[in-house]
Image: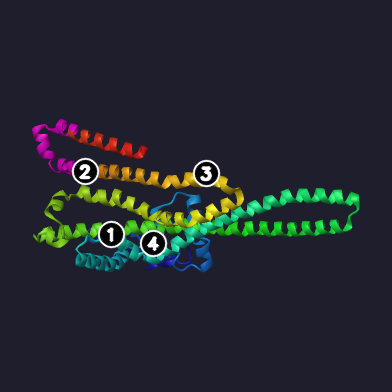
């Protein structure tokens, strides 16, 4: 309590200290064991601070002055904590399992995730679409502003020729036309400035939503894997059959290992994380492509069909390459699981291997598996 009073009025005033006291040695001075991170300032920030990310200023300046430490980091927001995410996801996952069981189908994890994060997905999609609209609007304004400078030089040349011929009515008409064009040019410039600001804000928030959404998926799935692993340990301790608890077949239970679980949490979850970050790409293409074709047709005419045709050829090619890359990745994942399982068995039976001098035999076996895994990963990277 006395230590917390000293922190009053400082940037770290929300920090709590946990102390331990060694009574066996007769110690009276408390020892600092762990310091909880400071309260996340985003939770109590005003709307402007949240809009411009100014609640991160203190952390950024601290990192600019010195190297960041663990106690400088903020606490995890409540909406990003694993227990809260997992608690809400379980309702949708249980409902998905119930519906698929009635239809005799396998439950779909991605569908349950979409239902749980549906409002965040919708908002993320709207912001992603707005960013593309801002890009197109900015390009159109740049085109109109460039056209103004071309028209301005032509109008000024026409005015100089009319002044020589003393055509007052035509001069007044051209001057009015030039004034209207100049006024529109100022409007175009102002629109470019406004859209540039909105584009910057929307771009920042789109990437923020993309990162936080992917991070929440990763936290949620790792928490689900952890919970399954804990059920496995608890039920094994009480000698309860594993397939009755996890609803797994005997073949899957035979492949379970610590290395396999770590591989799921570190590699496979990250792939799914990246997939959800770019989820909206597939439907935005079908929405924007007709609009882009119309705008190009109005500017370039039939010649724009060459570029449009090249763009339309790309999705089937990318789909075929994606299917090939997926097969290679699944093959690589199987080899990786095999390597991790073999390494886990080697570590578990290290004494026996040392006793029979099998080190080089297992070394060659693991090296062979690793070489095969590296070859498949290289092929996937080339694609």
Any magenta on residue 345?
Answer: yes
Res 72 visible: no
Prevailing secondary structure class for the magenta stretch in the rendered image:
helix
Q: Which secondary structure, mark 4? A: loop
Q: What is the distance, in whole Å, between disc 2 and disc 1 at their CAs?
A: 25 Å
Can you tell which quarter of the image residue 86 is in? bottom left
Pick whichever of labels 2 and 4 is earlier in the sequence. 4
Can you tell which quarter of the image residue 221 is in? bottom left
Mark 2 or mark 3: which is in front?
3
Residue highlighted by disc 1: 109
Residue at horizontal 57 percent and vertical 54 percent from the top: 295
Q: Is residue 135 above or below residue 9?
A: above
Mark 2 or mark 4: which is in front?
2
Q: Residue furthest front?
A: 302
Q: What is the distance, in whole Å, between disc 4 and disc 3 at their CAs?
A: 53 Å
Residue highlighted by disc 3: 306
Mark 2 or mark 1: which is in front?
1
Q: What is the distance, in whole Å, between disc 1 and disc 3 at their CAs?
A: 41 Å
Pick whichever of labels 1 and 4 is earlier in the sequence. 4
Q: Which secondary structure, mark 2? A: helix
Query: Where in the figure is residue 178, as x and y percent of width and height?
Result: 78, 56
In this orientation, which residue lies closer to the viewer: 256 or 187? 187
Crowding at label 4, few (<14), some or many (≥20) Cα neighbours within 10 Å?
some
């Amino acid at each position: 309590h006395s230590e917390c009073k000293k922190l009053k009025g400082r940037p770290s005033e929300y920090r709590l200290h946990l102390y331990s006291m060694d009574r066996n040695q007769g110690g009276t001075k408390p020892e600092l064991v762990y310091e909880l991170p400071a309260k996340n300032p985003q939770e109590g920030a005003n709307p402007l601070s949240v809009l411009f990310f100014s609640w991160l200023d203190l952390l950024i300046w601290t990192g600019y002055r010195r190297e960041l430490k663990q106690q400088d980091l903020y606490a995890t927001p409540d909406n990003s904590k694993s227990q809260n995410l997992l608690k809400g996801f379980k309702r949708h996952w249980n409902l998905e399992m119930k519906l698929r069981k009635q239809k005799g189908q396998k439950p779909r994890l991605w569908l349950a995730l979409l239902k749980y994060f549906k409002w965040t997905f919708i908002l993320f999609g709207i912001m992603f679409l707005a960013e593309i609209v801002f890009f197109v609007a900015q390009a159109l304004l740049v085109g109109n502003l460039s056209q103004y400078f071309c028209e301005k030089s032509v109008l000024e040349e026409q005015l100089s020729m009319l002044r020589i011929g003393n055509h007052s009515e035509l001069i007044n008409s051209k001057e009015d036309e030039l004034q209207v064009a100049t006024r529109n040019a100022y409007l175009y410039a102002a629109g470019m400035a406004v859209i540039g600001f909105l584009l910057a804000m929307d771009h920042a928030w789109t990437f923020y939503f993309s990162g936080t959404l992917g991070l929440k998926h990763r936290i949620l799935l790792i928490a689900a894997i952890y919970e399954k692993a804990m059920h496995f340990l608890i039920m094994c301790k009480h000698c309860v059959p594993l397939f009755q608890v996890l609803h797994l077949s005997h073949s899957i239970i035979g492949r379970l290992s610590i290395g396999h679980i770590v591989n799921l949490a570190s590699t496979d979850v990250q792939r799914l994380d990246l997939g959800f970050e770019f989820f909206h790409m597939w439907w935005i293409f079908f929405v924007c492509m007709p609009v882009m074709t119309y705008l190009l047709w109005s500017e370039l005419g039939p010649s724009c069909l060459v570029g449009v045709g090249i763009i339309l050829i790309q999705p089937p090619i990318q789909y075929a390459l994606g299917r090939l890359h997926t097969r290679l990745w699944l093959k690589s994942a199987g080899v990786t699981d095999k390597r991790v399982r073999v390494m886990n068995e080697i570590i578990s039976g290290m004494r026996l291997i040392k006793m029979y001098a099998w080190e080089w035999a297992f070394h060659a076996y693991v090296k062979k598996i690793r070489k095969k895994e590296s070859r498949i990963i290289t092929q996937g990277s080339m694609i």
